[in-house]
Image: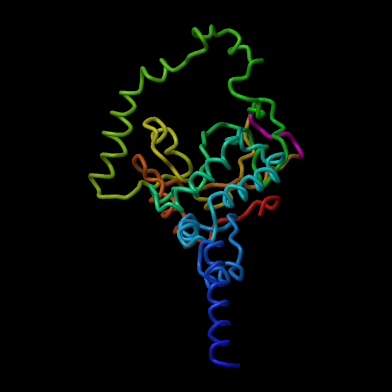
Amino acid sequence: MPPRSRANRLARVTLALAVLALVTGTRPAAAQTRRTARPISVAETSLADLRTALKQRRITSRAIVQQYLARIAMSEDQLNAVITVNPHALAIADSLDRERAAGRVRGPLRGTPIALNDTGLTGYGMNPWDPRRDPRELVFDGRPVPDPKDTATRACTPPAGNDNTHFLDAGRPKDILLSATNGIDAALAAHQLDALLFPGVSSANIGARPGYPSVTVPYALLPVAQGTGGLAFPPGFTPRPAPFGVTFTASAYAEPTLIGLAYALEQATKKRVAPPLFP
């Protein structure tokens, strides 16, 4: 092939590659890496790995949210664990993807979805290792709280406009003083700790009062006592072992630290046992 023809052909190939780079937003080599890279699943991927994948553009916030929404949709009819899902979750994910593309990342968890959790008694029948309903009449059966059919609820006079916020605001300064300033914050500072470790979910009360985060790590399956009196299981019903975990609690905005500690403990102990219905 004459030199001029080879040069023209090389120029056309170079131009085609440049156009491909503009369309995909990356170099062709990087695009090939993305096509051959192993798909990212949120099921067992740590937040640190998701953050790295977002930074490397191997996944988008929208794709992460879609995976979580799919898992919720597949399991919610059996777990009944999610009260509501933000209807704008995908739109928010898209906006965060645009921010990241523009080079604006405002925090280590930016772009990863979160679930806001509250603690409530759901009865032994909600143990995922034993999905049978609790047969004891005196045990809470999973109805919503407050239950509109409950006698005590009907006896209460609702506040004007059903606004209960003043009840929360009244005790807020006391909660901050006792649970935060002279509680968790004081213990962390005095002993130079990153977090506090509690058995089970015993820190749920003290941490929730000032609004501090907690992360519980599965640790063991423990036998369930047969109980006595009204709390005794009926003859012929043998409860299966129930999960027991340990909880890390720290100050405000310590979620990244707590998640890191929880993940490290889970990987070091290998105590996590996936429920048989939801591996």
Residue ID at (72%, 32%): 135
| Residue 114 percent location from the top left of the image | 51, 43
Which colour scheme appears in the figure?
Answer: rainbow
Residue at figure coordinates x 59%, y 52% from the top left? 63
Location of residue 35 by image quarter: bottom right
> Residue 154 sits in which quadrant?
top right
In the depicted structure, whether residue 78 falls above or below residue 265: above
Q: Is residue 119 magenta?
A: no
Residue drawn at (57%, 31%) of the image: 121
Left or right of 221, for residue 53: left
The image shows residue 171 at horizontal and vertical percentages of 36, 20
**Residue 264: x %, y % from top left:** 44, 59
Vertical relation: 6 (above or below) 29: below
> Which is more toward the observer, 33 or 155?
33
Q: Nearer the viewer, residue 167 or 90?
A: 90
Helix, strand or loop: magenta stretch: loop
Residue 116 placement, left or right of 225: left
The residue positioned 58% from the left and 47% from the top of the image is: 65
Q: Nearer the viewer, residue 5 or 195?
A: 5
- Disc tally is 0
In the rendered image, the quadrant that contains the C terminus is: bottom right
Q: Nearer the viewer, residue 157 or 130?
A: 157
Please give the range of residues in magenta.
231-236
